[in-house]
Amino acid sequence: MTQLQAGDLVRVTRAASVQFVNPIMFRMIRVLDWPTYDRWVWLDGYQLNDKGEAVARRSIFVQPAGLIIRRRTAPVPVGQQRRSNSPQRH
């Protein structure tokens, strides 16, 4: 199974859970550490509209093997984390 990461963009279809007869796009925040059945997970994130805008925060119960990963979030190399553009206070 591919490890899901924060920021991943996934297409959730009926292959992941029967509740998704109408597929959705989902931006991952995290995999929740909630008890589940074997090969199922709870995901926390945002449902996206056709423009890629978040329209609802959701926790969904799915089989990761049925998810279609559209875009992976590349890890930020150590030492290259985002820096604030705000002025430094002295």
Image: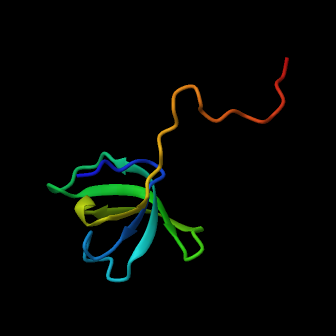
Residue 90 at x, y percent in the picture: 85, 17
State which quadrant residue 17 falls in: bottom left
Q: Nearer the viewer, residue 10 or 80?
A: 80
> From the viewer's perspective, is 32 left or right of 1?
right
Q: Is residue 48 above or below residue 64?
A: below
Q: What residue is at 28 percent from the left and 51 percent from the top?
A: 2
Residue 48 at x, y percent in the picture: 52, 69
User: Looking at the image, which residue sits at the far top?
Assistant: 90
Residue 83 at x, y percent in the picture: 69, 33
Residue 87 at x, y percent in the picture: 84, 30
Q: Nearer the viewer, residue 10 or 42?
A: 10
State which quadrant residue 38 falls in: bottom left
Q: Nearer the viewer, residue 32 or 21?
A: 21
Q: What residue is at 31 percent from the left and 56 percent from the top?
A: 42
User: Looking at the image, which residue sits at the far bottom?
Assistant: 22
> From the viewer's perspective, is 14 left or right of 77?
left
User: Looking at the image, which residue sits at the far left?
Assistant: 38
> From the viewer's perspective, is 89 left or right of 68?
right
